[in-house]
Amino acid sequence: MATAARVDLDGNPIKPITICMIGAGGFIGSHLCEKLMAETQHKVLAVDVYNDKIKHLLEPASLPWADRIQFHRLNIKNDSRLEGLIKMADLTINLAAICTPADYNTRPLDTIYSNFIDALPVVKYCSENNKRLIHFSTCEVYGKTVGSFLPKDHPLRQDPMYYVLKEDTSPCIFGPIEKQRWSYACAKQLIERLVYAEGAENDLEFTIVRPFNWIGPRMDFIPGIDGPSEGVPRVLACFSNNLLRHEPLKLVDGGQSQRTFVYIKDAIEAVLLMIENPARANGQIFNVGNPNNEVTVRQLAEMMTQVYSKVSGEPSLEVPTIDISSKEFYGEGYDDSDKRIPDMTIINRQLGIALFPLSFWFLFGVKIILTGFGCGSARLEPQDITLGLA
Ligand SMILES: NC(=O)c1ccc[n+]([C@@H]2O[C@H](COP(=O)([O-])OP(=O)(O)OC[C@H]3O[C@@H](n4cnc5c(N)ncnc54)[C@H](O)[C@@H]3O)[C@@H](O)[C@H]2O)c1
């Protein structure tokens, strides 16, 4: 419940503010809006072209927070109302982006425009109007690890310095230009540099967030059910789709890439701390992830297959996974980062974020995702999932 007695990390009372949240209708935005409505007195001007994922927060008008959230349907590419909304708010949070890997090499122009060009006016309006900005970037700005260039059995591969990703020391290593997969990472990197430069030269108060594979309900879509039938969502939704359709899970290039996953509600806690502790968050770039939850994509497929079989009562397929080349799956120009382990020193120091819990939350996240998608396709009920994994 919302409470008037909220204090920041230094014990000062937190005054309610108005937040212009761009991309509020997406996965992260919907969870952040939920948290802000349920636990704070802040107001949200929710900007997006869609509102399906936040409809439950907008209607009916009798909701206790009805006077604290307003939806503004607009495309930030070409809408003159944007500056007015930013001016009305104390803080702008920019989440809007094309951020599905299957688009990076197949729609590189849209990807670059969305992640760089479309974000430019947001940064400019915040800077010109002296408004604070929290900009969502990505862990992809690190690209490949230094360690991935060492021979496989090289002893330095064991040294965290060569693969753990640290905001203030790790380089950003992308592949060649014809590997168009890097269009997203490169656009995000350039907008980060612009935000940082606005901070350095024009005193823009900013925070940059680099999420490391946040997962949970309302993430992506199931092709043909709540998204385009030929669309390719992010890996968890791809695997959920395969499971729900009783198809083998497709492992791109053997599923050897390693990822660390974090449950959305843990990550949102960190974002709320950034919102409510500007003195500690301004001028910072934060990794937000769980270094303890590392799995290969193959392990993820095996885990999700087991979870699905347990909750649905259906036996696993005889051949639960098949290998597919990245060229066949994603098309020409695909490439990938080998490993993404966040260093959490800076966010621990500034916001006192303890390491997120171990893999329990990871499993929980998987189960919630299946719950979300299962409900969408009417094959699984939430209670089946909860019981199955209790
Ligand atoms: N989910 C993750 O784990 C993750 C990882 C790395 C980075 N990020 C970053 O976090 C941000 C949010 O990610 P998400 O997972 O919620 O993505 P999402 O696709 O679910 O949400 C993005 C939202 O932005 C909206 N949007 C896009 N272009 C717009 C425009 N021109 N005008 C108005 N609205 C527009 C979309 O309609 C969508 O609702 C993105 O910037 C993404 O790059 C997320």
Image: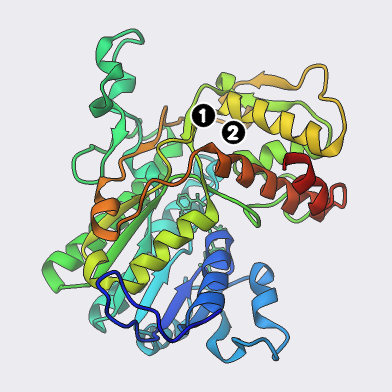
**Residue pointed to by mark 1:** 295
From the viewer's perspective, is residue 311 above or below residue 351? above
Q: Quadrant of the N terminus?
A: bottom right
- Which residue sits at x=42%, y=57%? 115
Q: Quadrant of residue 299?
A: top right
Element carrying mark 2: helix
The image quarter containing residue 304 is top right
Q: Residue at x 70, y 75 (%)?
A: 56
Q: Is mark 2 within 8 Å of ligand 1?
A: no
**Position above or below: 174 against 7:** above
Q: Amino acid at mark 2?
A: Tyr
Along the viewing direction, whichever of 248 and 40 lies nearer the viewer: 40
Mark 2 neighbour density, 10 Å: few (under 14) some (14–19) many (20 or more):
many
Is residue 181 among what the camera can see? Answer: yes
Q: Residues under labels 2 and 1: Cα distance? A: 21 Å
Q: Amino acid at mark 1?
A: Val
Q: Which residue is mark 2?
A: 330
Please give left or right for residue 389 compared with residue 350 in the image: right
Q: Are marks 2 and 1 in contact (CB under 8 Å)?
A: no
Judged left or right of residue 348, residue 385 is: right
Q: Is residue 313 left or right of residue 282?
A: right
Pointer 1: residues within 10 angstroms few (<14), some, or many (20+)? some
Residue farthest left in this picture:
201
